[in-house]
Image (cartoon, grey):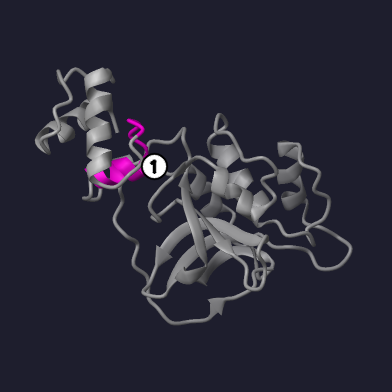
Amino acid sequence: MTTLEIQRRLAALGYDPGPLDGIRGRLTIAAVKRFQTDRGLLADGIAGPLTIAALFPEPAGASAQALPWYAEAERLMGTREIAGRQHNPAIIGWARRLGLGYRDDETPWCGLFVAHCIAAALPDEALPANPLGARNWLRFGAAAPAQKGAVLVFSRPGSSWSGHVGFHAGEDATAFHVLGGNQSNAVNVARIARSRLLGARWPRSAAFARSETMRAAGGGVLSANEA
């Protein structure tokens, strides 16, 4: 989303951004802040994912929906742990390339999977400290609506500190469909109850555009304790 597109949208909604020149100047920042205040958003003048979603509630065209990190996640579907003393060299390789001290695929690797996909597709994107910890992804990127490609962070039943992390692949009335790692020991899509969602995040280095909600068929087993 360009500054000029944001200026045009603000002007159309009655928030004067000053000259429609594509420059993020003081008048444009002030207009963004007024819009954010009226929508109950943090009035910081930054057109982040939540502000963009409020400015442009209609889904964007397919050309704006390039999600290279999600494409990498889809490419890896079917990757799974090796039972016993051996470990999948692909999973161990993700950690090695990221410089993480991860040595066996018996250790939860949902955060490692997300870190690999983000780092492989967006090399300039900052990862959270200790990306192996699922809840640490609540500090990744910027807050965003739960839509395709967003990083979704979930609580884990019975625990106040552990969790699960994966990518939004779709949703139904009661659950998010999550493309993630360490789901039944593999990379696949699992249904996770909406009530477990702690937050949704979007990479700061990737353009955000509102996408059409990926509605999926309900029913099927709800994942309760990813491993």
Does the magenta portion include 83?
A: no
Residue 41 percent across, percent down from the top left: 32, 44
Residue 47 percent across, percent down from the top left: 33, 34
Q: Residue furthest right?
A: 85
Q: Report whether residue 161 is seen.
A: yes
| Total tally of numbered discs in the picture | 1
What residue lies at 23% left-to-right and 49% top-to-bottom? 57
Does the magenta portion include 46?
A: yes
Q: Report whether residue 65 is seen.
A: no
Q: Is residue 221 above or below residue 191?
A: below
Residue 16 percent across, percent down from the top left: 13, 27
Q: Which residues are magenta?
A: 44-55
**Horizontal placement of 96 versus 188: left or right?**
right
The amino acid sitting under disc 1 is: Ala
Q: Quadrant of the N terminus?
A: top left
Residue 203 percent across, percent down from the top left: 48, 40
What residue lies at 53% left-to-right and 81% top-to-bottom? 221
What residue lies at 62% left-to-right and 41% top-to-bottom? 128
Q: Quadrant of the C terminus?
A: bottom right
What residue lies at 41% left-to-right and 48% top-to-bottom? 144
**Horizontal placement of 11 versus 116: left or right?**
left
Residue under pointer 1:
66
**Horizontal placement of 41 versus 178: left or right?**
left
Image quadrant where residue 118 sits: top right
In this rendered view, identify the residue nearer to me: 163 or 86. Answer: 163
